[in-house]
Amino acid sequence: MEKGNLRADVNVRCASPATHWVRRCEIKNVNSIRFIGQAIEAEARRQIAIIEDGGAIAQETRLFDPTRGETRSMRSKEEAHDYRYFSGSRSAAVGIRSGLCR
């Protein structure tokens, strides 16, 4: 950070109120606060489209392409322990009212 470098990993998982939590995707090496926000929005849109079409979210690691404004698959993960993150039960769900989304 002393040189002004930032690299963050972001975990995103979406579900409708009628469904249980689905598998999450990890977005690796996002390098600015602005890109973190864009990566979350792009990945949430991607997951919502898959869920609305009746598909399943693959548990995987993804990269964010800021030029295209989208995420792409980097590699798959077999189990949650491959990610080494805390279980979802320790994380509070964040609800976003539809009026706040564009």
Image (cartoon, rainbow, N blue to C red):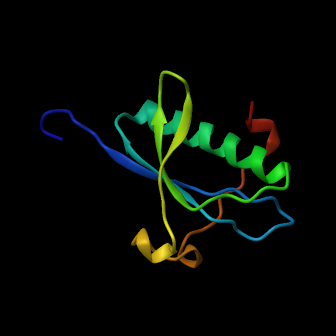
Instruction: Please indicate whether residue 23 sits to the left or right of residue 96 in the image.
Output: left
Is residue 69 depicted above or below 42 in this figure?
Answer: above
Q: Is residue 29 above or below residue 89?
A: above
Instruction: Give x and y (percent) for residue 68.
Output: 54, 23
Residue at left 75%, top 30%? Answer: 102
Give the side of residue 23 with respect to residue 63, left or right.
right
Left of 12 or right of it: where is 26? left
- Residue in the image at 34% along x and 36% along y: 31
Answer above or below: position of 45 versus 57. above
Percent coordinates x, y for residue 64 in the rendering? 47, 37
Name, please, the residue furthest toward the top.
Answer: 67
Residue 32 lies, in percent from the top left, at: 37, 33
Q: Give how far across and how far down residue 15 sits, in percent.
A: 74, 59
Question: Along the line of sight, which residue is nearer the eye, 101 or 63?
Answer: 63
Q: Relative to 56, is 34 above or below?
A: above
Query: What is the quadrant of the N terminus in the image?
Result: top left
Residue at 65% x, 64% y is 93
Residue 41, by quadrant, is: top right
- Residue drawn at x 78%, y 55% is 55
Name the one closer to the observer, 43 or 101: 43
